[in-house]
Image: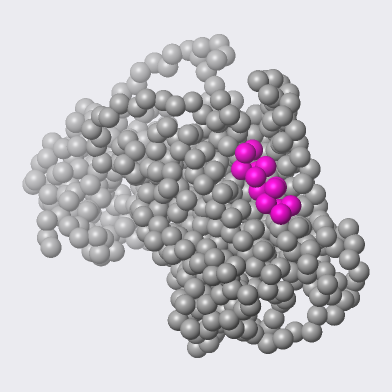
Amino acid sequence: MGYGTASKKLVPRVPQRHGEGDKDHLTSFGGLAALSLDALSSVAYGPEAILLVLATAGASALRLTLPITVAITVLLAVLVISYCQVIAVHPDGGGAYAVGKKDLGATVSLLAAASLVVDYVLTVAVSLAAGAASLASVFPSLAHHILGLTLLGLVLIAAVNLYGVAESARVFMLPMLLFLGAVFAVIGAGLFRTQPVAVVGTAVPVHAVEAVSVLLVLKAFAAGCSALTGIEAIANGVPTFREPRAERAQRTELMLGALLAAMLLGLAVLIHKQHVAPRGGVTVLAQLTAGSFGTGWAYYATNIIVTLILALAANTSFGGLPVLMSLLSRDDRLPHLFGLRAERPVYRYGVVALALLAGLLLTAVHAATDRLIPLYAIGVFIGFTISQTGLVRHWFGERPPRWRLRAAINGTGAVLTGLAAVVFIATKFAAGAWVVVLTVPALMLLFARIQAYYTAVGRELDLSGPPTPTPQPTRGLVIVPVGSVSKLTEHALLAARSLADDVVAVSVWPDPERCSEFRTAWDRWDPGVRLETLVSPHRSLVHPMVGYVRQAAEGGRQIAVLIVEVQPHRWRYRILQNQRGLLLAAVLRASTDVVICTIPYRLMTR
């Protein structure tokens, strides 16, 4: 076995029903499209982040771009190997959270979970905002509609993921292939040219405002490490793969690492060869595209493809965060509804929660990328460091073959990613990183409080103590609120008599005259159920009924209230029906301990 690779398993081919088996799960290649777009698209801004930091030390410092990229690629290799190990050790997903919970304790696992939640939400916001901004740079008329474009993209991506993760992979497969083809075409064409075909953007004087130093190199390294965001999503989303899940997820992780390393190194070589420096109005990738293809149709096509993939990179979070939230709910650290899945293997409550959080964040900053970037990447590097450190602890505890080599690899990764996280927080704190520094502990507190609540509830419901005396059975009473002599009332009474022998119909009227008329009609109908009538001069149905139910329940008698609910043939007619029954049920639940039963009466009127 290699570095924590999973063993192969034979899975029999058995016919499956809709929503069962592997049909709605991801293949290895499909995992690239569903879970890796964030990492792959990071080549659009990772190398540029390095240049922007180095440019502060003058044009001569830009030559350090290539060696810094090589160092980042080495770290990428370490992380890919490490996450293959994480997948093997934790095939149920969860990534850094699962590692932290098993090997580093509850507090560290809460830190991992909180940092990953922040990172996933920011990934969606940054990806959509960057994509919209890039599209607006190609079509300036859209510049005033950035927020609307991002929210529209958010709704579309969320809708696709609500339908199914496998469907999202199919939808995003073609854009991913176009992006990979475009980037490798830029690299290939540029390497064979002796000089750039065209130069785009406006020249920006590069003045040295600080000297080349170890701190500057560390800042450039940390900034360039933003190209590594997203590689943890595969380890978080292992349950979304087809069987054998761990092996397919590892294969996807290795493919992602190879593609990302090739693109980062290729672009860094081009930057070094063409002496590219930051220019006004264009990205570094746009400069390299113009240098390889000129400013013809290929230039515009490549930029549009990059815009599209940046926007679709948000899909990575929709594949990873709902799975993480399901694990948190399983550990009683989030509401249990986040662990519910639809017929297709989709955690829909997690998808909706992610869409709402990202939408609120985009609206709050008006989709301004410069306000989101300082918050970005901190969470994922905290997760990187926790997963690496946890694996070191794991190898020291388990001591499998070659455990020292594995621990050395993971330890090196932990040091590098931890250093990048510290540098990123220190250099970006005043620019907005303080928000993440406050949000992560707040989420940790929220998870801990939810867990404490579930623990207290479990203690209260526990039956492990001495048995309580068996209660003596009492004769039950079913109360049926009625308001007319009709098929609706007949339907409710038939259901009530099937539940208990003692049934009483209760009707509330605003005056004695109408009350007397209804009793006369009831006696004429004679359904075999006694009738109790209440007079409420204030025309209130709910309070007299609640008072009657409370009085009937005195002495510990078991009471059930059966409320019939009219169900129109078409959903749009529901608002036309009287909702007093639903109101009565809500008040009874809040103020009494009786059993509330609702029974539908389905109308056929169209």
Residue ID at (36%, 55%):
170
Residue at 34% across, 21% down? 474
Q: In the image, is residue 508 above or below residue 153?
A: above
Question: Which quadrant holds the C terminus?
Answer: bottom left
Q: Which residues are magenta?
A: 70-82
Look at the image and tell me whether residue 592 can be seen. Answer: no
Viewed as shown, does residue 430 lie left or right of 175? right
Q: Position of residue 324 (x, y in %)?
A: 55, 43
Task: Classify the position of the N terminus by image quarter.
Answer: top right
Majority secondary structure of the magenta segment? helix
Which residue lies at the image location 57% right of the left edge and 66% below the top edge?
187
Camera-side residue of 288 and 520: 288
Q: Position of residue 524 (x, y in %)?
A: 8, 47
The residue lying at 57 percent from left, 79 percent from top is 290
Which image quadrant for residue 454? Answer: top right
Specify the quadrant of the image occupied by residue 102: top right
Relative placement, left or right, of 559 versus 524 is right
90 and 39: which is toward the camera: 39
Q: Can I make out residue 526 in this image?
A: yes
> Where 504 falls versus 177 (above or below)?
above
Q: Check if residue 275 falls in the magenta segment.
A: no
In-image side of 400 versus 580 (left or right): right
Instruction: Say whether residue 453 is left or right of residue 520.
Output: right
